[in-house]
Image: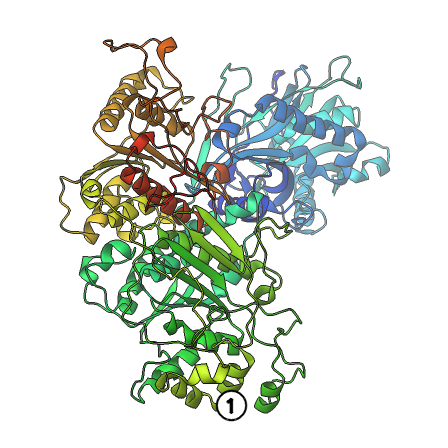
Amino acid sequence: MAAKAEVRPRPLKVEAIKSFVAAAFGKALRDLKLDVLGTDDSPIPITGYYTACTHPKHSARFSVLQKSLAPSSVNSFGSRNNCPVPGTLINTNNMLGFQNLDLASLLREEGKKILHDILSGKIEECPSLLLRFLVISFADLKNWKLYYNVAFPSLDFNSKMTLLSLHSAAQVLSQEEAISLSKSMKEWCESNETTVHPFFWVDISSDSSVVVRQLKDWKDRQGGGQKLLFGFYDHGCHQNYPGWALRNYIVFLSLRWKIEKVQFLCYRERLGGIDLEKSLIGEASFAPHHGWDGSDYVPEVIGWEGETPGDGRKEMKVNSISLELMNPESQAEQQQLMHLKLMGWRHFPVDLDKLASTRCLVLGAGTLGCEVSRLLMTWGVRKVTVVDGGCVAMPDLVKQSLYVEKDCGVPRATAIVPHLEERCRAVEVEGIRMEIPVPGNPVSPSVLDDCRLLQTLVAKSNVVFLLTDTWESRWLPTLLCANENKIAITAAVGYDSYLVMRHGARPGTRSGGMDDVISQTKNLSTEDALGHQRLGCCFCNEKTSLFNSVSNETVALPGLTSIASGKAVELFARMLHHPEGIHAPGDIAGMDTEHQLGLLPHEMHGSLPKCVLSTMIGNSSNNCTACSDVVLSEYRRERLDFIMKVINQPTYLKDLTGISNSLIKSDTCLNLPASFPVNSGKLSSVKCLILGAGTLGCDVARILMDYGVRKLTVVDSGCVVVSNLARQSLYTSDDLNAPKATALLKRLKERDPSVGDQGFKDCKMEIPMPGHSVSSDGVDHVREDCEKLQKLVATHDALFLLTDTRESRWLPTLLCANENKIAITAALGYDSYLAMRHGAGPRTNSEGSNVVPAMTMSAEDVIDRKRLGCYFCNDVIAPVDSVSNRTLDQQCTVTRPGLAPIASGHAADLFARMLNHPDGIHAPADIAGTASERPFGLLPHQI
């Protein structure tokens, strides 16, 4: 042995372990939370990687890597530089949950596991359990951040561990022992069986030979005069004290093997072998205090990284990792799809792969086409082809949600492409300018090229949306979809009503053979290929032949197209996720369904003045001009020659199908009723205040502008982020990081440049909310916001409450009631919505005083009518903080993409009806199904 200096006994001091949590781990955890875990915050087994010190001046770090999310049993292969260690991850659903974790209790539970493993002998089989670790985290999915803390639990029995001696291994070992130890440790570290075990024991014989053994071999050891060292991989580099792992090792040796004085070896490395100068050999004593082995005994546990035991600190510093630089090229797409993934947390797992690969053909790039194309992207569709034959005109700008002034004169099929790409870089959009051939409109033979192109487009698409302005322009696409058995969805609007429907599958063939055109023709059936009664197409209920109606212009109430578009895309999503797809039978409102997306109707007929939505089933017609057996038979026999006959001979389809001219065309939503007496002067002068410039705010503002409103103030505190682009209809990538209120008004002005700055105003402010406590430093700022909101409400005629949280609507509701202002609320759930008008303010029974005692307030308004309730009248609890302690899907109000335009359309329509009602805010509430003599129809309280 080499000479060594004596060391006086002193309390054992160890070097704490420091962790390295890789950004790749944070990204993997984010993906796991979003795609798999959802709201589940149960503990997760993970794997960390421990290593001995390999640098003379820098301690090794404990690594948590991308592969750490696999349990240690999967990660059993490693080396001395990557010893897999089992751990526990607790990932909370929100920051408040993270902050409220009971750190002492969590650490104690992990300590119990270590103690159990010691006493049961499990440590001897798996020594890494002595290094068991704990990670608590909050993965902020929306902001791409990971907040975390790490603990390395160490048992503390209130008995001091005493360091009796500590020296460099080179000072303690003889030259022969050092050589033998170096050789044995090299063999240990190079063996796949032993290298991953960070704890071992060293048997030094009297002849200086050294053998390194596993802990499980302890029971088979032979007696004699051997010298024993209990070794471990030491992460630390300090020469005056060993590493953290020694504490639990000493506890194990004392409790399990009853060794009170432990001679230990701190193994440290250099250039792939033991560093005898840096490695330490020492002796420590430990005797657990009386009663430790009682069944109810729980030792104290220490070990939070960054926390010094006994220093009295109540809070640790929270670590954080920014994930924004991880895969930046795919980050935007992931942000846009996040709301769809969040739908699966509580409701329905959206098939994103199926949606992304679905090819959608949108026929018509007008009012319906713009909205449907954008909503398809919101649903995750990434392959869209848009066909249109017209150009953007100035009157289109306020009605067709994607176009701006610079698009005027540009073909719509060309103009729509960049607007869709600005909202989603991942979408593949093709715009094709083409007039769709229509029956009864003779043209030159050059129309054959258009027919061939449309045949090709339908054949390579999975879904076709029929959104053109005229009824007969839907005939050829309907015929082609029936022939190709493609999903076809029709949306059509009249003045104040709409139709949304899916077409049924094509006729089945009883022979099952599809190669022989003649056999197909003879065997066409009124059933589909599954033997179901075929649902009809949009022509099956039409009882007349098709004539030229291209001169007719469809005039619709501004909110109607938003509602119809939302219904059409929702129908598409349900159909795509239905196990029977195009063959799914039609459902009727009120039916029970096991499908997670709800009922799958065949036809939906909606009427704004009647406040009704009817679902209907219409089976295929034997004399349908587009999908009947006889029409499909002729088309399959003659192909383009048949189409040319239909185009050039107005009576050909009538003669072919046997339709009589005496039959009257059925009552469809395309019939135009008497005009709605819109008071354009009142609309242009009314001052509207919009609170919230998100999904609802964008749609409502655009529809109000279409109604003729020209005085808008928009309030919002947020800025535009990538995830907003597909869902919030007015924003593009150019608006990123801009205040939402400013960006929204900028986009509206692009649609009507005549609107000056005097009419449109923006205000970036937080709306004060009950339940959200304010620090003493922030009181003055909140008071200023309250006064600002008071002034805004007082100086406007109507208020739209479109904010994300319930409590943010409380103060505006109070102020509107006090000022007797029109207030409209629109709110979204996952698969439902609310649009309502607030009642008038209460009448007071005293006059001449600005301060009205509460007891003098009346349940009637100023014209002695029973007051209608506000948004909060049906609540049984006061508004509180509804964000901090909620999961992300609740905070973001995850809703199906088609729902926002539906709610926005109803909210704007409700406002217009209310403004044109002679009683205004005092108007009584109407119920669907009741008769109304008013030209604008019913005026409900809540929808």
Quadrant in which the C terminus is drawn: top left
Question: What amino acid type should be assigned to the residue bearing mark 1?
Answer: Arg
Disc 1 crowd, CA 10 A, few/some/many (<14, 14-19, 20+): some
Q: Position of residue 876 (x, y in %)?
A: 51, 23
Question: Is 434 situated left or right of 51 in this image?
Answer: left
Q: Position of residue 463 (x, y in %)?
A: 48, 68
Question: Circle 1 — which element?
Answer: helix
Q: Position of residue 833 (x, y in %)?
A: 46, 42
Residue under label 1, please give it: 637
Up-down: is 655 above or below 408? below
Q: Residue at x 67, y 47 (%)?
A: 195
Please say whether residue 56 is visible from this viewpoint. no
Q: Residue at x 31, y 76 (%)?
A: 435
Who is closer to the viewer here, 630 or 575? 630
Q: Residue at x 56, y 80 (%)?
A: 629
Up-down: is 72 above or below 7? below
Q: Position of residue 907 (x, y in %)?
A: 36, 42
